[in-house]
Amino acid sequence: MNEQLNSYVGTLIEDTMMVMDEYQTPVMAFTATVLDKIEDLLDCKEIVKEHCIVTKKNGDIIGEIHAYSESTNGEVLYLFYTDFHSGSDILVKNNTELQKSLNRLQGFYDKAIHGIHHDVDSSSAEYRAGKFISDNINNYTSVNLVVLSNYIINNPEIKKLRIASKPVFCDIWDLKKIYGNTHSMSDHVAIDIDFEAEEYKRYKIPFIQMESSLYGYKCIQAMFPAKLLYQLYERYNTKLLYNNVRYFLGLKGAKEKQPNVAMLNTLRKENEMFLAYNNGITALATGIDSNFITDKTDITDPESPNSSQYISMGILKKISDFRIINGGQTTAVLYNAKNLSKGTNETDKKVSLLGVFVQVKLIISEEIEKISGNIALSSNFQNRVKYSDFSVGNEFNTKMEILSRNIIAPNPNKDLIYWFYERLRGQYDEQKKHLIIKADKDYFNSRFPKNKKFSKEDVAKIWSNWDQRPFDAVKGASTTYGAFMKGIIERSVVPDENYYKQTVALLIIYKFLMSRPENKNYANGKATIIAYAMAMLEYQTMNKFDLLKVWENQSISDHTKIYLNKLCDKLYELLDEQARTLSTSVLSYGKTSKAYEFIKSQSLDIDIHLLDNDLL
């Protein structure tokens, strides 16, 4: 592990240095680098990366953040603080120093909710962050304080933090966690439930287990206290739901038309009947620890020639990598119904979770990624949720991976150079890690240069832009990917060689736009400007821009670069002016379709003939 971390530190420094021109300081460059790598794991909307600091009159720091955001469903506020050292050595920090980082985050939050934006320059980062928090505070059910660090923080013990009227949770992304989750070959951060830990030890959950020798999975049937599901949702929000399949649909509407309202009424009027009326939830896990209270009982059908089945019973001690694949609405109803009742004195509207249980079917397999799509499809069949919504193993992604390993990128020397599609997170580094001989590693690097690696989230973003939905592309990686995959499914898109080459061409345009030093002039509007520039390039050229020419050249022409430079500056000028008129930011305004309609209606005054040689 130490050898891998040492290698990764060098990679992290290289990636950080690449964005120094844009972010100016090593701390902010590191912040941006790490957040770009883990953004879709956090379930955040577009993260604002700005250094904000509040001090006393004597200069002592009261509060500090390096980025902020909210969850994709708008229920959780995220505040980020970066603890960074510029050396290449792997250093260790203790809990006392960690607590200082958390205190900085807590201090900024306290100042923000008390109106710090009224006391600072309206053009400052502190004003933007403070106003964002103050304006939206009533929408948040909890606050997540996140420390990003290139130190190793061993066994962090986080002291209880108190934030006014909100549950507060802390996530520590140190060097080990950043490396582990960007090389995990998985698309989520594992949630482990340890029933021997302080926060969960009050729950004693018996289960019955069936295991099959043929398929190597286990199925557990249990009943979870509703209070446990409430606690898990409060802590993890939609990260608890597999691939964020569904968001909470609310508690309003006619009973017969809104199942959530029926659940709410049951909780209010006859809460202990919830178990009888509700279908329960289906969840996935990679393993459990338990105390078995019976030996295995062989229940194999004598007529079964190829398989054996066994039943056993026990008490749960730990669930590894727990995620709900069906029953997200049930879980969210329990959480929201209980919270809703806190604001009322009317007895008939009160909700108690005492005595409320939920049936849980827990599927356990070490190869859960391989079977999860079929589980999701079967569990959600009545809602027409498709396998492709859930799995990185769907036809689109597997076909893109195959194409990327077989289509040679044009180059003057006719070398075997390929773009590398990461269907799974960390796939590139994982594949390289298994190469022992230096010559093999050098060969891999020459065939698959790191600057030609791209992810499924990148594909979703660039095609959303090109398909005239740039306002979707700036809503966060997981949201963008979900909307993109929905379109892929509805149109039955299966990538072919032409689609793949066009995708790479769009990546080349995107990478040019991302690398512009001028991006630093756009404050938190960078992502919006890049998305809108790609969309407007397609719109202005009326589907005539020659993407295959970009593929053949593996670059865009100088004239196209000039056009895009002018376009970006013009877009920022227009969007910034309009956003100020509407008392919002370029980032927030850019997420609306109205913003794009506004841009399309404007005269850009840029010489379109710059693109003449790059059109079909």
Image (spheres, grey):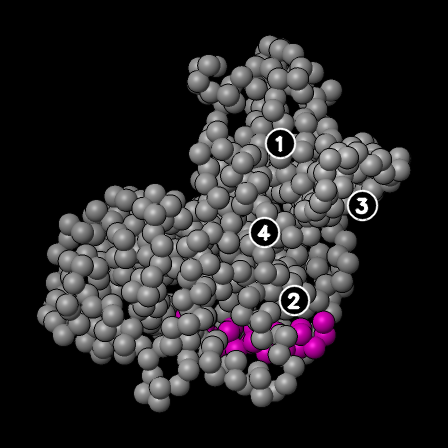
Between 342 and 483, the one nearer to me in the picture: 483
**Residue at mark 3:** 289
Mark 3–mark 1 contact, CB under 8 Å? Answer: no
Residue 90 in which image quadrant? bottom right
Residue 143 location, x and y as percent?
59, 43
Estimate the spatial distance between the alpha carbons at disc 4 and disc 1, rounded to whole Å: 20 Å
Estimate the spatial distance between the alpha carbons at disc 3 and disc 4, rounded to whole Å: 22 Å
Q: Counting residues from the N terminus, which is met first, the one under dot 3 or under dot 4?
A: 3
Does residue 428 belong to the magenta stretch?
A: no
Between 462 and 584, the one nearer to me in the picture: 462
Residue 163 in which image quadrant? top right
**Residue at mark 1:** 281
The residue located at (59%, 51%) in the rendering is 369
**Residue at mark 4:** 370
Kindly identify which numbered label has been placed on residue 175. 2
- Mark 2: secondary structure: helix
Mark 2–mark 1 contact, CB under 8 Å? Answer: no
Total marks in image? 4
